[in-house]
Image (cartoon, grey):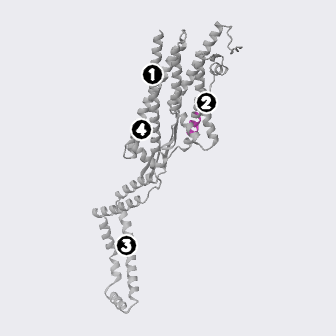
Amino acid sequence: MKHLNLIFSILTVIASVLLCQQIVANSMANQQNKNDFAELNHVKYGLLSIDEWNRQVTIILAEEINKLYLSKANEKVLRKHIVVLLNTLIDKVDKRIRHENAETTGGKISQSFIDLFIDLDSIKKGIPEYADAVIHEMTKAKTKRQIKAVLNKQLEQYSKQTFDFRDTPKLGSILLRTDTVDVEAAKNKLKVEIDLKHDLIVKEVLALIMLAAVIFTLSGFSRQTLPHSRYLSLILILIILLFSGVTTPTIDMEAKISQMTFMLLGHPVHFENQVLYYQSKSILDVFRIMMNHRDIQMKLVGVLLITFSIIFPLLKIASTVGFYLNYHHARQNPVIRFFVLHSGKWSMADVMVVAIFMAYIGFNGIIANQLGRLNSVNEEIVLLTTNGTSLQPGFFLFLSYTLLALFLSELLTKKHHAEERRNPYIDPRPRIQMP
């Protein structure tokens, strides 16, 4: 039976280590994918981008140019404008010629011949016919194609002259990392990878938590004395849960405009998945950010964070091992007795779990409230916002560690009290030996 317990303990620890390694690796890879995906969808590359507005407006204007059509009513209006324009043009030409000829003798002679042989009123009588000829020429298919070609060429020049000065090195690195040639291809590839990785991580986390829960349940309800191999496997599983809980993302905070649409010249101008804010951090990520901050207050908060989330739990685990093995009379040590027997009801790890959960509720409520004010649905504009704040597998791993650590502490406390009842004359205080 002893050998079976040893083999079972070794196998559970090996399985837990393998699952932990996969969870951490996949979580970090997916965290990078999520950050890249959020960067590609950031509002600065869409709704606030000159290039994106230029692209959409240019497409709309090009479509309008290609749909140019002179109706009968438009022809009449255009004919009136052409008549006025030709009449004004003839008057200006006549006035200019008279002004130039009046300055010299030869010019005066030329002007007298012009007045003798050219009747300006007769020319103006033909203006309506000239206007009809112009309209006829403009309505020809060849002329229409030429006009549209000229307009499109000019539009293309204007489009090239309109651009954003902002440098985008992040986009280039993301395209290089995803091995894609454009932003849309990178988005599609990252979306598929994120979904696949997320499903895999959830399955691995559930497997690790269920494995740990089964081992602790079997150990807790066993009436036999807990063998050393089983106890050490429980401790190692706790360390594995703690490690995976602090190194993988615990919460994702996202605020985005999921859809914004309005009509321009009868064409929709559409923006979607415009990320306003996104963060996906683990406890260690938050600690590094705080320690790199210039303010001493932030550094102090980082030290407190790492103390309550890692140092205290590790001290508690070490105290539990020393208490169980009674290494160097550890059961008589007041510090170890405090960590094992008196801090089990409410430890700093519990505070961390509650703090993360309250932060999730708080951010979720604030973001939902603020984005709710932006939602708008009317004839002019459709604006829909989305709150993507969610708890991540790291939170549930850390929560599992906390609950199972409390369970193990309670188990040791009950066994210790049972031993004290069986041996009421044993003094738990340290004995002072006289020389």
Secondary structure category for the residue under label 3? helix
The dot on residue 191 is 4
Q: Which residue is mark 1?
A: 14
In the displayed structure image, the side of residue 106 where residue 6 appears, left or right: right
How far apart marks 1 and 2 lie (CA) works out to 28 Å
Whether the magenta-drawn stretch holds residue 189 is answered as no
Q: Nearer the viewer, residue 116 or 260?
A: 260
Residue 321's spot in the image, x, y percent? Answer: 57, 19
* Callout in the foreground (3, 1): 1
Q: Examine the rendered structure and indicate whether residue 105 appears above or below residue 317.
A: below
Q: Residues within 10 Å of mark 2 (few under 14, many from 20)?
A: some
Q: Which residue is mark 2?
A: 308
How far apart marks 1 and 4 lie (CA) works out to 32 Å
Instruction: Tell me which segment is drawn in magenta.
Output: 361-369
Q: Nearer the viewer, residue 73 or 366?
A: 366
Q: Earlier in the sequence, mark 3 or mark 1?
A: 1
Q: Examine the rendered structure and indicate whether residue 362 appears above or below residue 342.
A: below
Secondary structure category for the residue under label 2? helix
Identify the residue shown where x is 46% and y is 18%: 10
* Callout in the foreground (1, 4): 1
Residue 325's spot in the image, x, y percent? Answer: 58, 16
The answer to whether residue 304 is seen in the rendering is yes
The type of residue carrying mark 2 is Phe
Q: Considering the whole magenta stretch, tell me its main secondary structure.
A: helix
Quarter occupied by the C terminus:
top right
Q: How many marks?
A: 4
The dot on residue 83 is 3
How far apart marks 4 and 2 lie (CA) works out to 35 Å
Q: Earlier in the sequence, mark 2 or mark 3?
A: 3
Identify the residue shown where x is 55% and y is 38%: 288
Residue 112's spot in the image, x, y percent? Answer: 35, 90
Q: Earlier in the sequence, mark 4 or mark 2?
A: 4
